Image: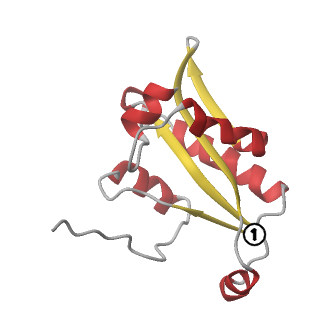
Amino acid sequence: MLQLANAYAAFDGTTSEADLAITKFFPNGFWVAEEDDEVVGFAYGYFKDIPADVLAHWGASKVGEITLMAVDPNYRNQEIGTTLLRKLLEEFKKAGTDLVVLHCPEEAKHAKNLYDNLGFEVRAYHMKKKL
């Protein structure tokens, strides 16, 4: 799974075993797709600690964050990402989450299309400039 995460889900650095240890905080938020005992996709999210004034501004009471998601390119266009994300969103909803956020690298066009199709909206631009 680390290989899959680092190849297709790493945003700004390498994903390690320690990064995946956070799944213990919300085990129902960790979903894996397998084919012939090989991990071909996964999605993980947990609850985001948001100050009360920000929650009020967002009109939310509990926020979930999708932290990592990846699908092996050889298995894309088979509804794996959609299924994983729907399962994760269902678990968030069961846990009382009323808003879900995520970060998506600009180059991950396939992921952005998936998020768009599932009703996510752009709320900010995360930008950089190298000097």
Residue 18, given in percent of the width and then of the height, sits at: 59, 35
Position in image of residue 22 (x %, y %): 67, 42
Residue count near mark 1 (Cα–Cα under 10 Å), binned few <14, some 14–19, many ≥20? some
| Residue 58 rendering spot, x and y as whole percentages | 66, 83
Q: Is residue 57 left or right of residue 6?
A: right
> In the rendered image of this protein, does residue 48 appear above or below residue 111?
below
- Of residues 89 and 28, the one drawn nearer to the viewer in this rendering: 28
Residue found at the far front of this picture: 131
Q: Where on the picture, by quarter, is residue 94?
A: bottom right
Res 80 → quadrant: top right
Residue drawn at point x = 48 percent, y = 37 percent: 15
**Is 27 situated left or right of 21 in this image?**
right
Residue at the spot of label 1: 98
Which quadrant would residue 27 be assigned to in this image?
Answer: top right
Looking at the rendering, in which quadrant would you find the C terminus?
bottom left
> For the residue marked with disc 1, what is the amino acid?
Asp
Q: Residue furthest left?
A: 131
Q: Which one is nearer the viewer's eye here, 104 or 86? A: 104
Residue that appears at 29% across and 53% down = 107
Q: Who's the residue at 43% across and 26% down the image?
A: 3
